[in-house]
Amino acid sequence: MTGQIEEQISWFPVPAEDQLPENLQGLFKKAREKVGFVPNVFRVYSFRPERLSAWLMHYKQLHEPTENLNAAEREMIAVAVSMANGCLYCLVAHGAALRQTLGDPIQADRITLDYKRAGLDAKMEAVLDFATLLTETPVNASPEDIAHLQSLGLTLEEVWDVIEIAAMYNFTNRMASATGMIPNREYHALAR
């Protein structure tokens, strides 16, 4: 838009890219090449550059697909947790990622906004129910929840992944909310 004022993306100072360590400047360059922009989460988290690197390494590990929990299903966990937390940044960013990985923008939007009415299979509904439980009332988690997910085909390692992905997004949602993080405008148009 012509004449648009640059949007504040965080309540915290966002370092200039040329002031960041070389490895993060490389990360920003790689993001521009891959998706066409630098996600604001990278820019906001660069307030503490050493922690951005650690967070990103953990994020990448959690999004590695496995036999019974593919990339789209991992994004479904991200949006279910983010919806339970009302996290604007992650709903927009991971809603876009879900549209891309799922290849069905209508279904992805339905899952993002209300997975219970999205017509998911029993396995994914149970996975998202568990991730939501871990978000809203983690004290109610039980061994029966783990056994139920295993009965639907997940390995014990994949159940661990569900727990860890839910925990990661609870952390990320809280960081986004507490820093006033605003999603990149580019996310809204992706995979539509």
Image: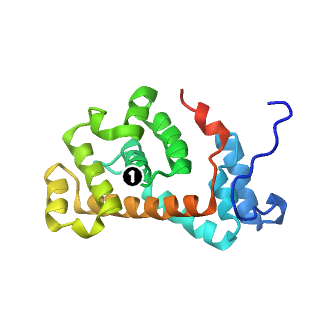
Q: How many marks?
A: 1
Residue 181 vs residue 189, the one in the foreground? 181
Counting from the top left corner in percent of width and height, residue 103 is at 44, 30
Residue 132 vs residue 54, the one in the foreground? 132
Q: Is residue 153 left or right of residue 29?
A: left
Res. 123 image quadrant: top left
Q: Is residue 56 left or right of residue 24?
A: left
> Who's the residue at 37% across and 64% down the image?
164
Q: Is residue 124 left or right of residue 48?
A: left
> Who's the residue at 50% across and 58% down the image?
173
> Quadrant of the image for the C terminus?
top right
Q: Is residue 52 left or right of residue 106?
A: right
Counting from the top left corner in percent of width and height, residue 102 is at 42, 34
Instruction: Name the outermost residue toward the right.
Output: 3
Q: Secondary structure at mark 1?
A: helix
Counting from the top left corner in percent of width and height, residue 149 is at 19, 54
Counting from the top left corner in percent of width and height, residue 183 is at 62, 46
Q: Is residue 61 above or below residue 118?
A: below
> Who's the residue at 19% across and 50% down the image?
153
Residue 77 vs residue 136, the one in the foreground? 136
Identify the residue under disc 1: 84
> Quadrant of the image for the N terminus?
top right
> Which coloring applies here?
rainbow
Q: Amino acid at mark 1?
A: Ala
> Who's the residue at 38% across and 33% down the image?
110
Q: Residues within 10 Å of mark 1 (few under 14, many from 20)?
A: some
